[in-house]
Image (cartoon, coloured by chain):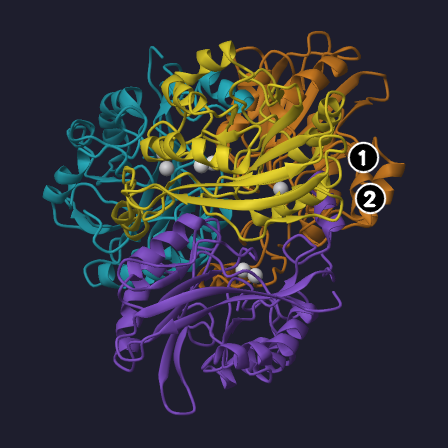
Chain colours: A orange, B cyan, C purple, D yellow
Amino acid sequence: MGDVVGKPGVTAVRTLLPKLIARHSVDLVVANAENSEGGAGISPESAEALLASEVNLLTSGNHFWTKKQILPWVQDNPNLLLRPANYPKGAPGKGHTVIQTPDGRKLGVLNLEGRVNMKPLDNPFTVAPELVAELRKQTPCILVDMHCEATSEKNAMGAHLDGKVSAVVGTHTHVQTADERILPGGTAYITDVGMCGPLDSVIGMKKELSIERFITLRHVPYELAKNLVYLQGVIIDMDDKTGKARSIERIREHLPGT
Amino acid sequence: MGDVVGKPGVTAVRTLLPKLIARHSVDLVVANAENSEGGAGISPESAEALLASEVNLLTSGNHFWTKKQILPWVQDNPNLLLRPANYPKGAPGKGHTVIQTPDGRKLGVLNLEGRVNMKPLDNPFTVAPELVAELRKQTPCILVDMHCEATSEKNAMGAHLDGKVSAVVGTHTHVQTADERILPGGTAYITDVGMCGPLDSVIGMKKELSIERFITLRHVPYELAKNLVYLQGVIIDMDDKTGKARSIERIREHLPGT
Amino acid sequence: MGDVVGKPGVTAVRTLLPKLIARHSVDLVVANAENSEGGAGISPESAEALLASEVNLLTSGNHFWTKKQILPWVQDNPNLLLRPANYPKGAPGKGHTVIQTPDGRKLGVLNLEGRVNMKPLDNPFTVAPELVAELRKQTPCILVDMHCEATSEKNAMGAHLDGKVSAVVGTHTHVQTADERILPGGTAYITDVGMCGPLDSVIGMKKELSIERFITLRHVPYELAKNLVYLQGVIIDMDDKTGKARSIERIREHLPGT
Amino acid sequence: MGDVVGKPGVTAVRTLLPKLIARHSVDLVVANAENSEGGAGISPESAEALLASEVNLLTSGNHFWTKKQILPWVQDNPNLLLRPANYPKGAPGKGHTVIQTPDGRKLGVLNLEGRVNMKPLDNPFTVAPELVAELRKQTPCILVDMHCEATSEKNAMGAHLDGKVSAVVGTHTHVQTADERILPGGTAYITDVGMCGPLDSVIGMKKELSIERFITLRHVPYELAKNLVYLQGVIIDMDDKTGKARSIERIREHLPGT
Ligand SMILES: [Fe+2]
Ligand SMILES: [Fe+2]
Ligand SMILES: [Fe+2]
Ligand SMILES: [Fe+2]
Ligand SMILES: [Fe+2]
Ligand SMILES: [Fe+2]
Ligand SMILES: [Fe+2]
Ligand SMILES: [Fe+2]
């Protein structure tokens, strides 16, 4: 599931996820939590609310440490919330881990952040192959959350890891793309899975405030929007033995009453 | 139709568009041509090839004048190829026009370019309402091509013009989004219609070269990819009298043999 | 005088300026106040402290409205504190004014902000000639504060206005440049006059915190440095009749005890 | 010496450097050559012309590989031309070396490139201490060329390496700064040494073309300017035993006839 935005996003996950898991027999759930506290950043409370909603693992992105209270929490729980693996050495938390189903089937998860029009982190294109090789010692089933702005950088990471991981899914733009497919090497790919949050908005925030910002170029504080809340993400079916993806399906579920 | 990328894109349009027009009883066709010559820029040849393919009007974006040979052509043909309306005063060409069906029903078209992580053009959020008001003197049916990078800027332009135009459709990222909808005020909206070009690529270009660029940070010249060529765009049904949109439907057509 | 940085900068101005005025028979003093409140932004208090120090007019830049309390003050005092003239229409305050000596000799002042690696304001290269023409109706003596990052943009503005104004002086980088000169058309020019603030620092802020920021890429809150406080600026001699500059001299005065 | 810009810059070095060496008893000369071929990039010819002018070592920056013909040359001559040390692994050439006087006194030289508003290279703040430690095994006398845009990044690198190297000198902005000094730990520092090239210009290029670019936002090809050619740089005196700097003096020499 893509970037969970504030209370509306958390509520959508808590309400809609259990039915989705049942309907599609989902084994494991990964959600990007970088906007879960107030629209920017993560708090222990927002992380725990999501983990209590049958989410197995949280990933993040450029808003990983926007709320500082998450830093001690992530040091205590490095295998519950990932930060992008290509953050500078010494950054709290870690960028990859392995989760498993009750019957012991494993999924490696790698979180990356892009650099086009973003921070000058370590190069995700050199970091990724090393960590994928490490994860493959434990399982061929690997999911990569590529958190970035540019479609070119996401396309390129998909191609770069095609055949080496089960899936490369993009997050960060908050808009779901319609290009989900299996790449030639057997890797499921989508440029962005879309946010869990209010669609009647500007990427989750109140439209009027964003428009004011674009007109005046002044810093206008954002507020969360409320209407048309959706859970968005993808369901990926992968072969436990080979790690190849069999299918990738987009999910868009409306939260009733919004 | 979104950014037509090089020969593969032009071929897709020439081959697939006539059937689409017939199948959906399309009245008027607008295509973004900014990548039609070799993947970056427009030439008189690429413009004319598209216009010969039952395209009624071309729009463009940040690659408008990448190929200089288009400048005299656009000065002779300002109503066949738009450049973003918010370019500096004195720029060749124009940014809005009115096209019409054989039976005289009019469609105003406005081309804009965003500024987030792009050039510091005039503010599209102040330019747009003025030109929309001008177009509305002739017709309530208005299509806006918002060419830009950031999902926030496209979302905000949709909200800004909602109820004032028939449709705001995004271009530039080359990846089709899955968020097409009618906004509360009656405006059809999609963040990006996607390119007409090879999907087995990095936004139209050969994957290997793009990956090399991301790894080495060196300027590696791009080459067009060839496989999985698609025509991508949207079909919008609008009420001739009120200009309100009735529906917006995504189109993705595969070019056989690719 | 260049960007006055926090209390150390204000103290340097209050302590050193009177002697400078006396020693060099200075007629009028203009200071950039954009960092005068706590290192980022302006408050009514910091503005008034500078104006009480024999400064005749304040200019500003990208930090003009970082502290919101300045907005009502500037609306009451639009001729005491300028904001860049190329801000969006409707922005509070104004970007040019005329000040005068006790004996009635006038100096027009124009404040601009650049756009390279900064906000997409209106184009200063088209705004400037219009406002210069307006000011020239009152006086040929005109000072331009070009607040921006790139040396290319400052060089180009100097060349653009050469012969039309008495001086183009740059601010914003907080580092004084050694390229002061009279341009061929008679305009005094310097790329940056340098800040009024602590030199034993990273552009005014504590070195350790800035280094930590560059190493970790985390947001580390800045604190003002204290040591080696200097007043920096230029003294320009201009011909009252023609507005041509006769000389430009760099000033660097150390605040004793720092 | 700072960025040598095209033929005018090379001529200034060839003409003026021998007298400077004699007058100031200079032991070793380092020049940034990144703009020596036509204003952008380096060619074997421009590199060899500078090395024939009593320059001992060339450094570079973001234009290191703008002219591709330099790549085989630098692989043959890795100790004559440095590229920034924090380029991606596998980049041709190297980023640090040791040069020496005829009587065997050694100078370590480290070339770095910043990242603020530049490419996302490896972090110079983590790369630098490692390479400085390596150079210190051979000599305590170390010169760092910090090639970057932002004054904050250069200030911070000076503070970061203060006491560990003999000098941190900035290049890239093409404008000499007036802030040369010995930092508290004994390191000579200047934010930018300035270019060797025509000052009656926009950072070396013809003023009219640059102004046109800022007004129209179109790509206007640059041409080299010709007037007021200067050699700019600094002379640093360092203690051979401790590596501490004794003095840093700015140099600005006019090329007669320009
Ligand atoms: Fe997000
Ligand atoms: Fe994000
Ligand atoms: Fe495009
Ligand atoms: Fe584009
Ligand atoms: Fe400042
Ligand atoms: Fe500033
Ligand atoms: Fe450079
Ligand atoms: Fe340079």
Query: Which residue was labeled with disc 1?
Result: A93
Vertical order, C194 against A153 (above or below):
below
Query: Chain letter of disc 2?
Result: A
Residue B41 in sight from this viewpoint: yes
Circle 2 packing at 10 Å, graded few (<14), some (14-19), many (20+), is some
- Quadrant for residue B20, please give it: top left
Q: Are marks 1 and 2 in contact (CB under 8 Å)?
A: yes
Amino acid at the residue labelled 2:
Leu
Q: Quadrant of the C terminus of chain C?
A: bottom right
Query: Which residue was labeled with disc 2?
Result: A71
Residues under labels 1 and 2: Cα distance?
Answer: 8 Å
* Residue occupying the point 31% across, 76% down: C239
Residue A147 in sight from this viewpoint: no
Vertical order, C83 against B109 (above or below):
below
Q: Is residue C92 left or right of residue C257?
A: left
Vertical order, C196 against D24 (above or below):
below
Q: Give the image location of residue D36, x and y in percent.
A: 39, 29
Q: Give the image location of residue A213, x and y in percent.
A: 50, 61
Q: Give the image location of residue B109, x and y in percent.
A: 25, 49
Are the residues flagged by discs 1 and 2 from a single subunit? yes
- Quadrant for residue A71, please give it: top right
Q: Taking the image as four quarters, which one is ligand 4 found in?
A: top left
Label 2 beta carbon within 8 A of ligand 2? no
Q: Give the image location of residue B8, x and y in percent.
A: 30, 19
Q: Nearer the viewer, residue A217 or D172?
A: D172
Q: Is residue D77 left or right of residue B235?
A: right
Query: Chain letter of disc 1?
Result: A
Q: Nearer the viewer, residue B37 or A51?
A: B37
- Which tag, 1 or 2, sits closer to the chain's start? 2
Q: Nearer the viewer, residue D52 or C36?
A: D52
Mark 1 secondary-structure assignment: loop
